[in-house]
Every structure is written in structure tokens, then in C-alpha cells.
Image (tube, grey):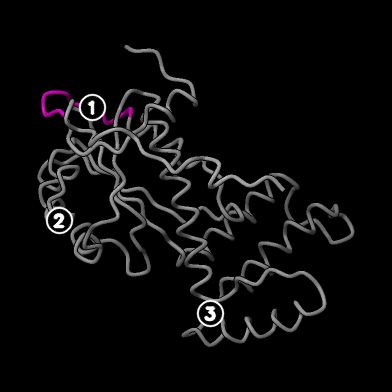
Amino acid sequence: MPTEKTVSEAITYRRSVRIYDAEKSIDKNIVKKCLERSALAPNSSNMQLWEFYHITSKETIDKIAPFCFNQNAAKTAQQLVVFVTRKDLWKKRAKANLKFMDSVFGENNSKEEQSSREKAARNYYGKIIPFAYADFLGILGFLKYLLVAVIGIFKPIYRQVRKSDMRIVAHKTCGLAAQNFMISMAAEGYDTCPMEGSDTLRVKKLLNLPYGSEINMIVSCGIRTEKGIYGERFRIPFEEVYREI
């Protein structure tokens, strides 16, 4: 068993691999372990509005490949992971955080007994999160947008409160989980390729995903062949993207 790579080594090793070795299988339990690490990713308000669909069935992979436009990364994959956003679960996740507060601070504390930290935490998940996520046909979001725009004239305020804004938040959060996964896979000596090019509607129907879910990305998994990496890595010179202020 090869020694697990350091974080820096894993980041350097990771490449988007397009062709996987059909003769080298990967352990689904190790992939699952990497997905457990995905769930440790930083995420907005600890709402964890994500789900990970681990596809190990060759039959299902063969069905998904055409929906990924028959990319080599999909056709030759040993396994797939579909990263899914669940913004629709915001109420359930907020309640889970409030329940966690009970284990931290104790249940049914009166306001007089609550510390300032407990009050702030309960207020956040009980009032601020519902304010940010609640919407009805985009109307409530527009009204919230006008409200924070007016308040923002007088003081700094969080402005991303529309339905489209919260959708972006959920996708950013899910992307962080996917990155955790790919770095973890690289640390194990496994390869991945994030694929945005797919017919997400057909994939969603095939996997019978819930109505309120959205596919963030599909990540193929396997072990690279010599032809699996299409050339040297290219990045814009760091000086062009780095600014110290």
C-alpha cells in the first residue's frame, strides 16, 4: 500500500485525467472515505446543502456516459461521484444545527440563562437563515433585496438574499466539497476528472434525484494511463492573478 501523500503533494499530483486504466480497479471503500472527507469541507453557515451520489455500478456508469457526451473521462471511469446541491433542504439543515446547539448549550435554556454566544447562534439559525433562504416565486427575494439595499445605504449588510443568490451559495459550497474529494483521492494515489459537460436533466432523471436538487458536477474516478493526461499543466503566470494589498 503506497504511503498517503501530503496535502501539497496531493495538490501537485492531481490532474484532470481523461483516460483511466481498465486493468486497475479502485477500492470503493477508499472512495467512500474520500467522500467522508468531502463532508468536512468548509461551507456557508454550516448548512451542508449537498449530497454525494457514489456510482459503483458499471451498468449505471455506461448509462451516464452518453449523458456526459461520451467523454473519455466518463466512458473509462471505474466509478463516478455526482455532487448535488440541496438548497431545498435549508429548513431541515437549520433545524439540525439548532439541535446541535442543544447538545452544546443544553435544551430549553431561558433567555436569561443563555450566554451571548448561544443567543447569537440560535438567533442565526432561527431567524437570519430563514430570512436569507425563504422565498416565494422570487417575489419575497426581490422584496428582501430592496430592504437590504435601503439598509445598506446606512451600514454594511449582507446583500445576497435573492433566490438566485442562495442558489449560487449552495453551488459554491458543493464545489468546496468536490475539491476536498479530489485532493483526498489524489492523496490516496487515485485520479479524478471534474465534468461540467453533461445533460444534467437526463442524469437527474436516471438517478431519480429529488425535484429540488441540482447537479453541481460529476467527478469520474480511476487510475490514470500514460495517455490519460492531455499534455503539460498550463497556468497563467501567478503574478497576473496575485495581488497584495
Q: Which labelled disc corresponds to residue 243?
A: none
In the structure shown, which secondary structural element does the residue marked by tag 1 occupy?
Answer: loop
Task: Determine which residue is flagged by label 1.
Answer: 26
Queried whether the magenta region covers residue 136, the answer comes back as no
Question: What residue is at 25 percent from the left and 62 percent from the top?
Answer: 200
Residue 235, how many percent across, how many down?
Answer: 41, 40
Q: Amino acid at mark 3?
A: Asp
**From what the image shows, is residue 204 above or below residue 132?**
above
Question: What residue is at 45 percent from the left and 52 percent from the top?
Answer: 174
> Residue 168 versus residue 43: which sits nearer the camera?
168
Instruction: Name the quadrant containing residue 121.
Output: bottom right
In the structure shown, which secondary structural element does the residue marked by tag 3 occupy?
Answer: loop
Q: CA distance from mark 3 to mark 1?
A: 43 Å
Task: Determine which residue is flagged by label 2.
Answer: 69
**From what the image shows, is residue 164 above or below residue 98?**
below
Numbered disc in front, either 2 or 3: 2
Q: Residues within 10 Å of mark 2 (few under 14, many from 20)?
A: few
In the structure shown, which secondary structural element does the residue marked by tag 2 occupy?
Answer: loop
Q: Residues within 10 Å of mark 1 (few under 14, many from 20)?
A: some
Question: What residue is at 41 percent from the left and 45 percent from the top?
Answer: 178
Residue 100, how many percent across, how many down?
Answer: 63, 49
> Residue 227 versus residue 50: which sits nearer the camera?
227
Instruction: Name the quadrant containing residue 180.
Output: top left
**From what the image shows, is residue 182 above or below residue 245?**
above
Q: Amino acid at mark 1?
A: Ile
Residue 222, how many percent across, how many down?
Answer: 23, 32
Is label 3 in contact with label 1 (beta carbons under 8 Å)?
no
Q: Residue furthest right?
A: 112
Which stretch appears magenta? 21-30
Task: Determine which residue is flagged by label 3.
Answer: 135
Queried whether the magenta region covers residue 23, the answer comes back as yes
Q: CA distance from mark 2 to mark 3?
A: 35 Å
